Amino acid sequence: MWMYLAGLVVLYYVVRWYRELARVPDRGNKYVYVTGCDSGFGNLLARHLDKCGFCVVAACFTEKGEEELKKSCSNRLITTHLDVRKTESIDKVAAFIKNLVGNRGLWAMVNNAGVSVPSGPCDWMTLEDYKSMLDVNLNGVIGVTLSVIPLIKKARGRVVNVASVFGRISPVGGPYCVSKYGVEGFNDSLRRGLKPFGVKVLCIEPGFFKTSVTDTNLLIKCVRSLWDKLPQETKDDYGDDFVSKVEKVMEETFAKMPDSDLMKCVRCMEHAVSAVHPRTRYSPGWDAKMFWLPMSYAPTWFSDYLLLKDNPPPAKAVN
């Protein structure tokens, strides 16, 4: 009996692997709009898609990001400035793309732009801290997508949203997980809403990779900045040595977790863009597959214990 079940599992994965090999034709006439191309996943994806023959519209936040990307890619790649927090910037890029693609429409939109700070305990935050991140990680994703949906419908193309394993489980406080849960919700509703139009909506849920989002030094600097702004009453709750304990945990544990092979994620993003039969969800990174996703399905008492056991306790923690 077990041999039959094992055989069925193997057969399923072989069939899926073979089915997913096929790539869309005529890439030279297909435009792909990617946000957050200054560095990290977005930068590598823009370069990779350019090498694959797609016409890439790479949206960068800085002029330096645009210039460096142009130098390393073919003439097919076009860069543009985009601030996903501003409606006028989003609309300007959408109008540019509409004029560029014409009647063929936009083949794919990849929502990659995102930030990870401010991050820290929820009671260290203000509403403005939440708003600042949600404006980029969630509202930016929604705004950019809505601005080009008519073009994607025309091409019967696809939307690729970069969420996170932290959109499935919340091991840290602050707005990051909130924003990624929001992306998951938007992704699911959009997928079902656009299916009748022949549009595919896919989600990338990366584990820990070595990008600016997981930069330990940046996160530690953010923790210190938040601490300095706290009222004395909150500082007393946590204790004067709490920040130093957090920094030690981050340097000894968190800093060693990110995977430096960003292409594991980029290949998933490229597959979502170019495969004839893309997956609905991708979970690049072994930590995502073997730890974070299983943990998201575990009983709450178990996941809470596992995620809290190594955290430094506040001074006034109740035993």
Image (cartoon, grey):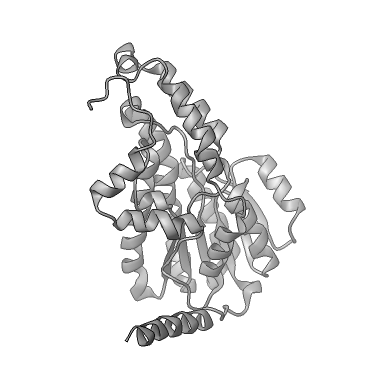
| Residue at the image position 59 percent from the left and 71 percent from the top | 30
Judged from this view, the residue extending furthest toward the right is 71
Judged from this view, the residue extending furthest toward the top is 232
Task: Tell me the quarter of the picture where residue 145 sits.
Answer: bottom left
Q: Is residue 27 left or right of residue 206?
A: right
Task: Tell me the quarter of the picture where residue 265 sits.
Answer: bottom right
Which percent across, then down, holds residue 11?
Answer: 44, 85
Nearest the eye: 166 or 2: 2
| Residue at the image position 45 percent from the left and 71 percent from the top | 279
Nearest the eye: 32 or 294: 294
Please indicate, yes or no, whether residue 2 appears anywhere in the rendered image.
yes
Q: Is residue 8 left or right of residue 91?
A: left
Nearest the eye: 260 or 8: 8
Q: Is residue 134 above or below residue 91?
A: above
Q: Is residue 138 above or below residue 100?
A: above
Quadrant for the N terminus in the image? bottom left
Q: How many marks?
A: 0
Quadrant for the C terminus in the image? top left
Task: Tell me the quarter of the picture where residue 237 sits.
Answer: top left
Which percent across, then down, holds residue 236?
Answer: 32, 14
Q: Is residue 231 left or right of residue 66?
A: left
Q: Is residue 53 left or right of residue 166?
A: right
Which percent across, then down, holds residue 259?
Answer: 57, 51
Please indicate, yes or no, whether residue 106 appears anywhere in the rendered image.
no
Which percent across, then down, holds residue 83?
Answer: 52, 42
| Residue at the image position 60 percent from the left and 48 percent from the top | 40
